[in-house]
Image (tube, helix red, strand yellow):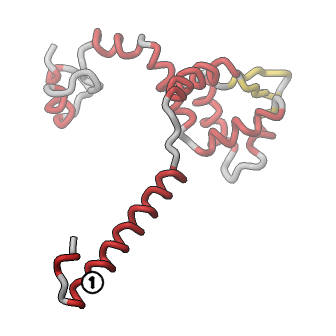
Amino acid sequence: MAARDRPGCSAALQHRGKFNHMVDRCAPGPYRQAMRDTPSAELDVVFSALADPTRRAILALLLEDDMAVTDVAAPLPMSLAAVSKHLAILAAAGLISQEKRGRVKWCKIEPDALRAASVWMQGFGQFEPVELDAFERFLAAEAADWAALETEHRAAAADGDLSRSP
């Protein structure tokens, strides 16, 4: 089925779909399914949820203890409905779980989803950290060398003795 034949595809998406079918929402079904079934798709959902500062603040609150939704919303400068939407995104990413106890909905952090993201990020720990202090010392030494050469060149030019110039 061509992109133009798929319902819900705008003209711009249909045109773009010809060139980038792997990321276009108008891509054929098997490609979309393959992208969803990869392990990185789960990480994408986790990192997408963590990208929002409000959701990170909610996770920080839940690190202390399980909390009722109203207690989570209390310190945040937004409505209870907005906090509930953020909680739903965190729950969909597997970062929190929600449980109803009586009339109160409780939220609890789920460390397993964060563990998967942490394991992925630790893969980048194999790179040596950049030693910026040593680099700064190197640049200072280079600048001093250039300044000395420039001073020597000016002195030679002032004396008229260009044989000393570099």
Residue at x 64% of width, y 25% of height: 95
Q: Nearer the viewer, residue 138 or 38?
A: 138
The amino acid sitting under disc 1 is Arg
Q: Is residue 90 left or right of residue 138?
A: right
Residue 91 in the image: state x and y as whole percent: 63, 25
In the depicted view, which residue is nearer to us: 32 or 42? 42
Q: Is residue 19 left or right of residue 26?
A: left
The structure residue drawn at horizontal position 26% and vertical position 26%, both measured from the top left corner, is: 24
Residue 20, percent from left and from top? 20, 27
Determine if residue 92 is in view: no
Q: How many marks?
A: 1
In the image: residue 115, left or right of residue 66: left
* Closer-to-camera residue (17/120): 120
| Residue carrying label 1 | 154
Q: Residue at x 22, y 76 (%)?
A: 164
Picture coordinates of residue 3 (x, y %)?
17, 22
Image quarter where the C terminus lies is: bottom left
Q: Is residue 67 above or below residue 155?
A: above
Of the 4 image quadrants, the one containing the N terminus is top left
Q: Nearer the viewer, residue 10 or 31?
A: 31
Mark 1 Cα-neighbour bin, 10 Å: few <14, some 14–19, many ≥20: some
| 27 over 158 or under it: above or below | above
Q: Position of residue 27 (x, y in %)?
A: 24, 20
**Where on the picture, by quarter, is residue 63?**
top right
The local secondary structure at tag 1 comes to helix
Quadrant hosting residue 159: bottom left
On the question of residue 134 being in view, the answer is yes
Q: Residue at x 14, y 25 (%)?
A: 18
When asked about the image quadrant of residue 158, the answer is bottom left
